[in-house]
Amino acid sequence: QVQLVESGGGLVQAGGSLRLSCAASRSIFRTNTMAWYRQAPGEQRELVGTITSDGSTNYADSVKGRFTISRDNAKNTMYLQMNSLKPEDTAVYYCNTPFLAQRNYWGQGTQVTVSS
C-alpha cells in the first residue's frame, strides 16, 4: 500500500519556524530518495529539496540555509525544518519520491502560511 501523509503545517509570522513531518509507507521509504515539494497559489509545484537513503541532502536555492531535511529510517518518516520563514514560503507542502512525483501520485499535502 502506497501512503504519504504530511503534517505540521500552520500559520506562522515571518521569521518564525515550523517543522513538517512526512509519514510514508515502508515500501516507499526504505531505500528511496525522498523529497519535499511545494505549490503556491497559482504557481507550478516546485522541488524544495531531497534526501537520499543515507542522508545526503540537496536544496533549492530559495531555501538553502533556512530549511533542513532529515529522515528517520526506523520510523519511515521524513522531516522538513523550516526556519526564518518568509511570506513567499507560503504554499502547500508535499513529500514524495521522485519516482511517484513523475507519475503524478501525491498525498494531501500540508498548508504553510507565513504572514508578513
Image (spheres, rainbow, N blue to C red):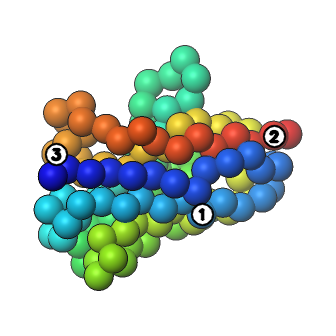
Identify whether 40 is placed above or below 18.
above
Q: Earlier in the sequence, mark 3 or mark 1?
A: 1
Q: Which residue is mark 2?
A: 115
Is residue 58 at least partly visible in the picture? no
> Residue placed at 39% from the left, 66% from the top?
78
Image disc number at residue 99: 3
Percent position of residue 11, x then y: 74, 46
Q: Earlier in the sequence, mark 2 or mark 1?
A: 1
Image disc number at residue 66: none
Q: Kindly report the distance in space between the C-alpha atoms of the residues bearing marks 3 and 1.
A: 24 Å
Q: Kindly report the distance in space between the C-alpha atoms of the residues bearing marks 2 and 1.
A: 17 Å
Query: For this view, does 73 lie left or right of residue 85?
Result: left
Q: Few, some or many C-alpha atoms within 10 Å of disc 2 (few <14, some 14-19, many ≥20)?
A: some
Label 3, secondary structure: give it: helix
Q: Are marks 2 and 1 in contact (CB under 8 Å)?
A: no
Q: Few, some or many C-alpha atoms within 10 Å of disc 1 (few <14, some 14-19, many ≥20)?
A: some
Q: Earlier in the sequence, mark 3 or mark 2?
A: 3
Identify whether 31 is placed above or below 37.
below
> Residue placed at 63% from the left, 44% from the top?
112
Going by the numbered disc 1, the residue's amino acid type is Arg
Label 1, secondary structure: give it: strand
Q: Which residue is mark 1?
A: 19
Percent position of residue 66, x then y: 62, 61
Label 2, secondary structure: give it: strand
Query: For this view, does 92 lie left or right of residue 114?
Result: left
